[in-house]
Image: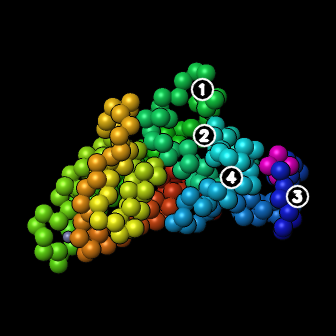
Amino acid sequence: MRTEILPLAAAKAILSLSTKYMMDTLRNQIIGYFERFIPIHYDPDLAKLKERWTAVFNTKPRYWPSRSEYFSLAVFFHELNVLHFLPWFLYLISEEGLVKILEIAPGDEEYAFRETEVMRKVTLGCKRLEDASRDDLYRTILSKHPECTDPKCNNDLRIYWLKNIEYTPTISLEPRAAFLELERGVPHVPAYWYEHWCQDPSDDRPAPLMRAPCVLCRTLWIRGERDRSRHIWDSLPWYFKIDVENR
Ligand SMILES: [Zn+2]
C-alpha cells in the first residue's frame, strides 16, 4: 500500500470496514495511507498542500474540492474516530469565514451538514480562529521596527491594511497573499487584499498601489505574518476543540 494511489471511495471503504471489524493492522495501514496526503503538521506552503491533495482525491483535477466535499470527509473521519485529520478539513471549511458558513441555506450542498457535530465544531472554531487571527494581524501591522528612522514609514499602507482586516475573513489566503507581495521586495504593494469587500464589485480596476514599508519594518511584518500562520496551524486542534491524540 506504500506507493499505489487508491481511489478515494476504495480508501474510505477500507477504513470503514477495518474499523467495523476491528482489523487494527489494516486500519493503521489505511490511516497511514491517508496521512501521506492530509497534513497534520505545519507546512508554510498551503497552496502546495492543496495541490497535492487535489491531485490524489479530487475527481475534477482542475478545481480544488468543494466545501461540501470537505464537510463530507470531516463527517466521515469524525464518525470513524480518526480525529487527527479533522483540524485540516475544518480549517479548509472555515477559510471563507464565519459569515459564509452562517449563510448556508436550504438548497446549498452544505445544508445537509447543518445539524452535525462537525458543523458545530466548524462554527465555534471558525469564530475563535478569526478573532485570534485578527488580533495577530493588528499587532503585526501596527508594529514598527525600533531602528526605523522614517516617522511616516508604513503609515499609508498600514491604514489601508487595517481597514481591510475588518472586512476580510482573516484566516483566508488573502492576507497571506498580501504579505507574499511584501516578501517579493517590491517597492509598492496593493492597498486592498480583497478589494471587492471594499469597492463596488462591478469595478474591476486593479487595487491602488501603496509604498511598501522600509526594509526593517518590512522584515518585521513578514516575520509577524509567518508567526501568525504557524500559530494558526499549531493551534488548530485547540481552536476546533479536538483531541487529536485520540485515533
Ligand atoms: Zn520603517
- Mark nearer the viewer, 3 or 4: 4
Identify which residue is drawn at 39% across, 53% down: 175
- Mark nearer the viewer, 3 or 1: 1
Sequence order check, earlier mark of 2 and 4: 4
Q: Quadrant of the C terminus?
A: bottom right
- Name the secondary structure under disc 1: loop
- Mark nearer the viewer, 2 or 4: 4
Task: Specify the segment rendered in magenta.
Answer: 8-12
Determine the quadrant in which ligand 1 lies: bottom left
| Residue 54 in view in this figure | yes
Sequence order check, earlier mark of 3 and 4: 3
Dot 1 corresponds to which residue? 108
The crowd level at tag 4 (other Cα within 10 Å; few <14, some 14-19, many 20+) is some
Dot 2 corresponds to which residue? 67
Any magenta on residue 11?
yes
Dot 4 corresponds to which residue? 54
Q: Label 3, label 4: how many angstroms apart (C-alpha)? A: 29 Å
Sequence order check, earlier mark of 3 and 1: 3
- Name the secondary structure under disc 3: loop
